[in-house]
Amino acid sequence: MGSKICFYLVALIVLSLVDHIRISGSLDLDPNFYDEICPQALPAIERVVEEAVQQEPRIGASLLRLHFHDCFVNGCDGSILLDTTCDFTSEKFAVPNNNSARGFDVVDRIKWEVDRACGGPVVSCADILAVAARDSVVALGGPNWEVQLGRRDSTTASIDKANTDIPSPSMDLPALITTFSNHGLNLQDLVVLSGSHTIGFAQCSLFRNRIYNENNIDSSFASKQQATCPLTGGDSNLAPLDPTAALFDTKYFDNLVMKKGLLHSDQQLFNAGCETDSLVQAYSSDPDAFAMDFVNSMIKMGNICPLTGDQGQIRCNCRKVNSN
Ligand code: HEM
Ligand SMILES: *[C@@H]1O[C@H](CO)[C@@H](O)[C@H](O)[C@H]1NC(C)=O
């Protein structure tokens, strides 16, 4: 009797596993993926990130953004880290990344330290980006969470997909919603993940039109921004995305409510009667709700089409595909 039930249970588990692999083409990620093969891996990543953020707080923002730009192009597979080869042009030169994505040298340092700690290339570059994003948020005062692990690295990159699949700051709300839903992310994911703009900076050329030509902007905020971002020249001058660029807080949402969003795409989330207004208001007044929803959406974003099992590879150098 008991053994019969057991047999059926095992059969059910095996069947559902087979089914699962067949349907999804891959295995699920797992927060304990490195517990046996290299328990030193996550502490090593954390040490390098903490040191880098201590030296330059902005690097935490830059690392968080790298994970986002990785996941939105063919899934979280480390493709953004590959340099140009004969076979493909690096995603680093795509419009959203060129002269904008940064932190690649810190990723190299993490990779070196983590391979040293593990005695070999055990941790994928895609997982390094996911863990470094979490450690950056924590280092800047944000929420902590268990990162899902077991991603493997791509053997190719796509500058074309990087150009089409990463949202642009000039997009209106419907286009932003579409970009996110193309990645299985909903309205709430869009709003809460945009809350990442509670840390970091943007270049003048990317918000100039907003501070000179838009109406849904606080006028004293616009004048203040115009002082560091002139009508002509100063394209790469930096402004903080919210007033506390080195602190992971809810000031970003407070600012949207006051029409002090820096990017056009930011203010689109709170814009006179649009469907995301109430979410912005909610996160502005409830930091715990923001923290909780942010964590859930980060895990969701980190689950976009990972390579797992025997797909892809564990790169020896995050900038290069392994040569066999
Ligand atoms: C909703 C659509 C989004 C758009 C249109 C957008 C656009 C931008 C732009 C234009 C910048 C400034 C880049 C520069 O000046 O070089 C930026 C910075 C940043 N973005 Fe986004 N972003 C979006 C969503 C996200 C998401 C989902 C995340 C993370 C999960 C994120 C994280 C960041 C961070 C942390 C920075 C600051 C980077 C630094 O200082 O180095 N963004 N974003
Ligand atoms: C990237 O930026 C560099 C330096 O500003 C520029 O020369 C190059 O044309 C840009 N590449 C692309 C593909 O736009």
Image (spheres, grey):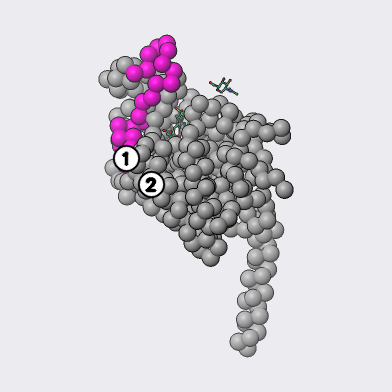
Q: Quadrant of the N terminus?
A: bottom right
In the image, which disc is placed on residue 50? 2
Q: Which residue is tagged 1?
A: 247
Q: Name the mark nearer the viewer: 2 or 1.
A: 2
Residue 228, quarter of picture: top left
Query: In front here: 291 or 278?
Result: 291
Q: Position of residue 93 (x, y in %)?
A: 58, 28
Is residue 171 among the parts visible in the rendering?
A: no
Residue 252, quarter of picture: top left
Task: Assign the magenta stretch its main secondary structure.
Answer: loop
Q: Secondary structure at mark 1?
A: loop
Please report the residue visible at 57 percent of the width from the left and 50 percent of the height from the top. Answer: 124
Which contiguous range is marked in magenta?
Answer: 228-251
Q: Position of residue 263 (x, y in %)?
A: 41, 27
Query: In front here: 35 or 162?
Result: 35
- Precedes in sequence: disc 2 or disc 1: 2
Is residue 52 among the parts visible in the rendering?
A: yes
